[in-house]
Image (cartoon, rainbow, N blue to C red):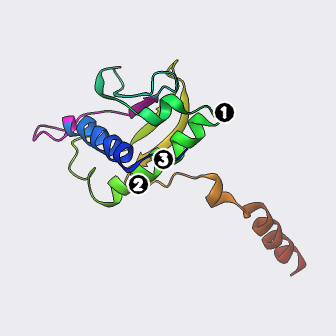
Amino acid sequence: MKLSQASLSLLETTIKQAVDKYTCGCEQTIVTDIHLQANQNSGELTVFDDEDEELANITIEEWLTYDGDDFYESVERTLVNLLNNLKNSGDFDRLTILKPYSFVLVDDEKETVAELLLMDDDTLLVNEELLKGLDEELDDFLKDLLEK
């Protein structure tokens, strides 16, 4: 699914609006996950916290007309890219949320579909791309050790 630049900008603004609620000069807040709930039927993206308090809500027009079977996979790719761009540009640096916390994509029943971004200073989120070819490398390493 290809989103328009306007929709991508709307998604970015909405995520910023949601997390800006955690930029006060007060003490740090304990939040383990920020949930992003995408709904293909209504086209809505709702952002909420651990207490199910709604932080932001928008409608993405392209989601309403999308009829593919890979809706969540497509939304996941879009949101991962967007969240990583926000992280790399420093948008999450000033939040008063204790680390680690995650941005999580959830379905209509609020079941986790995918972990989009883990915010932590020293933890790496392992994904399929990172693990690609690891079995072969480990097998080669073990074979090499056993031959010596």
Q: Nearer the viewer, mark 1 or mark 3?
A: 1
**Element carrying mark 2:** helix
Q: Nearer the viewer, residue 87 or 66?
A: 66
As helix, strand or loop, the secondary structure at mark 1 comes to loop
Q: Earlier in the sequence, mark 1 or mark 3?
A: 1
Q: Is residue 6 left or right of residue 27?
A: right
The residue singled out by tag 2 in the image is 84
**Quadrant including the N terminus:** top right
If you read the primary sequence from the N terminus, does the residue marked by circle 2 or circle 3 appear first? Answer: 3
Q: Is residue 125 magenta?
A: no
In which quadrant is the C terminus drawn?
Answer: bottom right
Q: Amino acid at mark 3?
A: Thr
How many numbered circles are shown? 3
Q: Which amino acid type corresponds to the residue marked 1 in the rendered image?
A: Asp
Does residue 44 lie above or below 140 as drawn? above
Mark pair 2, 1: CA separation: 25 Å
Report the residue marked by disc 3: 78
Residue 51: horizontal and vertical position, in percent?
33, 20
Residue drawn at (20%, 39%), measured in percent from left and top? 20
Q: Residue furthest right?
A: 147
**Residue 41, how many percent across, how many down?**
51, 22
Q: Which residues are magenta?
A: 21-37
Q: Which mark is residue 69?
A: 1
Which picture quadrant has residue 42? top left
Outermost residue to the front: 65
Q: Nearer the viewer, residue 85 or 123?
A: 85
